[in-house]
């Protein structure tokens, strides 16, 4: 477990402070490594960042020695599935697992994610509202995990990527009926958004094309009209929510971007017209390279996926990395996201190396998981940089990730909202 909750209020009503002595502090905005800095934390916020090593000011204050570490803002993964867990035959889980089973398993994966340095995640859809309950339990300090912004149940067309009845027998299809996340036509799309808002979602996720891990025949064809997507976007906007869009094929991407979604997830088959349109509209791209590589590797294991999945995983999975490089060169805004849950939780930082190999400078991959990700979430006042007023989400690594990006796989200190969860 962690290292305790926020310190109790001291004598006279003053809160004790924590002074973090940082040997190297990365200013993600400028890209500069600042030496010998002190971050001052009070309750759940950063109250100052000072040059030199500042001594503790009061008897209840404490000092954390990070003088041999590189210190960064807490990392943000903009595409995870906290209730998903990879494994051979995992498509059968919907028939064998109860909501409580998902919840207990997710607690462990949430802890792994947090200890890996990811203090915030955007959960892109799960089962039965359990992801919303997990978010709430973490917010109440009942379990440990990253700060979660969740889509609740992702919205899909009939036969689309999030239609759990895809590929089943007619009897099983009848059993599923018309779930609240399945919507066709503008009116049903508006209702589906309102339903997720009512249930407590923070963000809306839709699928404008098919996917790799569903049982549909095609992962690239468009599945929503531009009119349907616009109905989702406008309704979500009225409710103060942003819309993320799962999309592989180019036509589904273009419809979603024109309709005003905030981000394209995966974007595997985007063409030059997609990239130009995304840059023009300011649409974010969340590549999820590690997931593409993972599913392609798993597809080569006999029986790991259903036959309908194997061909899609082998053809689509390997394309994401090169597409990320093309998008970066074209000036498309890129935020960090991994699709954790498709691969195992806790190794999210593998994405940094894959992004760098795609042609992104190391500092840009880190910005994608900090300041850029905070912008995508609409959380710039709270997250993404080490500045006074921000949440005290602070991580420290062994080594210099600007020189060796694999250092992002070696977190040695993790603090979220002023509470230490890892210290080595």
Image (cartoon, rainbow, N blue to C red):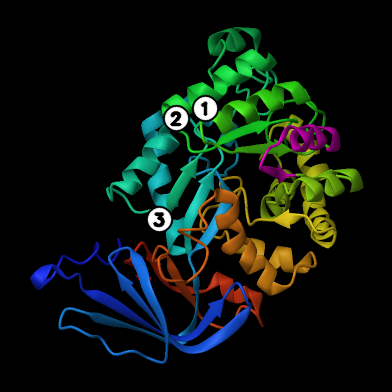
Residue labelled with disc 1 = 94
Name which of mark 3 and mark 2 comes first in the sequence.
2
In the rendered structure, does residue 251 fall within the stretch colored magenta? yes
Please say if 23 is above or below 179. below
Quarter of the image for residue 129 reads top left
Q: Which residues are magenta?
A: 250-266
CB atoms of marks 3 and 1 within 8 Å = no
Of residues 51 and 364, the one drawn nearer to the viewer in this rendering: 51
Please say if 264 is above or below 168. below
Quarter of the image for residue 218 reads top right
Name which of mark 3 and mark 1 comes first in the sequence.
1
CB atoms of marks 1 and 2 within 8 Å = yes
Q: Which mark is residue 97?
A: 2
Q: Position of residue 118 (x, y in %)?
A: 49, 60
Please say if 298 is above or below 172. below
Most extreme residue toward the right, as rendered?
Answer: 272
Q: Secondary structure at mark 1?
A: helix
How many angstroms separate mark 3 from mark 2 (CA)? 21 Å
Of residues 108 and 12, the one drawn nearer to the viewer in this rendering: 12
Q: What residue is drawn where x is 49% and y is 33%?
A: 152
How many angstroms separate mark 1 from mark 2 (CA)? 6 Å
Q: Which mark is residue 105?
A: none
Q: Secondary structure at mark 2?
A: loop
Q: What residue is drawn where x is 49% and y is 22%?
A: 195
Residue labelled with disc 3 = 111
Q: Secondary structure at mark 3?
A: helix
Q: Position of residue 184 (x, y in %)?
A: 67, 15
Of discs 3 and 1, which sits in the foreground? Answer: 3
């Amino acid at each position: 477990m962690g290292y305790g909750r926020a310190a109790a209020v001291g004598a006279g009503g003053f809160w004790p402070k924590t002074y973090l002595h940082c040997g190297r502090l990365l200013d993600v905005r400028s890209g500069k490594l600042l030496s010998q800095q002190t971050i001052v934390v009070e309750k759940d916020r950063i109250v100052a960042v000072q040059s030199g090593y500042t001594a503790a000011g009061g008897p209840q204050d404490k000092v954390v020695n990070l003088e041999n570490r590189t210190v960064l803002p807490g990392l943000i993964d903009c595409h995870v599935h906290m209730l998903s867990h990879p494994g051979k035959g995992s498509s059968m889980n919907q028939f064998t697992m109860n909501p409580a089973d998902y919840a207990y398993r997710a607690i462990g994966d949430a802890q792994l994610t947090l200890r890996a340095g990811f203090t915030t995640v955007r959960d892109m859809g799960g089962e039965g509202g359990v992801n919303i309950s997990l978010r709430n339990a973490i917010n109440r300090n009942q379990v440990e995990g990253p700060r979660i912004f969740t889509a609740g149940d992702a919205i899909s067309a009939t036969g689309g990527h999030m239609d759990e009845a895809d590929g089943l027998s007619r009897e099983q299809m009848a059993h599923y009926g018309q779930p609240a996340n399945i919507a066709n036509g503008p009116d049903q799309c508006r209702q589906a958004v309102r339903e997720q808002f009512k249930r407590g979602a923070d963000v809306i996720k839709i699928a404008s094309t098919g996917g790799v891990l569903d049982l549909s025949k095609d992962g690239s064809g468009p599945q929503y009209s531009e009119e349907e997507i616009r109905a989702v976007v406008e309704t979500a906007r009225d409710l103060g929510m942003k819309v993320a869009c799962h999309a592989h094929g180019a036509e589904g991407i273009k419809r979603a971007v024109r309709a005003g979604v905030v981000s394209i997830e995966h974007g595997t088959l985007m063409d030059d017209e997609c990239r130009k349109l995304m840059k023009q509209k300011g649409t974010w791209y969340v590549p999820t390279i590690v997931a593409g590589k993972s599913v392609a590797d798993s597809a080569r294991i006999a029986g790991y996926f259903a036959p309908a999945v194997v061909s899609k995983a082998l053809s689509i999975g390997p394309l994401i990395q090169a597409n990320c490089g093309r998008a970066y060169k074209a000036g498309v805004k890129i935020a960090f996201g991994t699709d954790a849950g498709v691969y195992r939780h806790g190794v999210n930082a593998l994405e940094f190396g894959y992004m760098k190999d795609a042609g992104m400078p190391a500092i840009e991959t880190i910005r994608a998981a900090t300041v850029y990700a905070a912008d995508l979430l609409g959380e710039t006042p709270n997250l993404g940089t080490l500045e006074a007023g921000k949440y005290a989400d602070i991580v420290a690594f062994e080594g210099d990730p600007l020189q060796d990006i694999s250092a992002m796989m070696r977190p040695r200190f993790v603090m979220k909202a002023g509470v230490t969860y890892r210290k080595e």
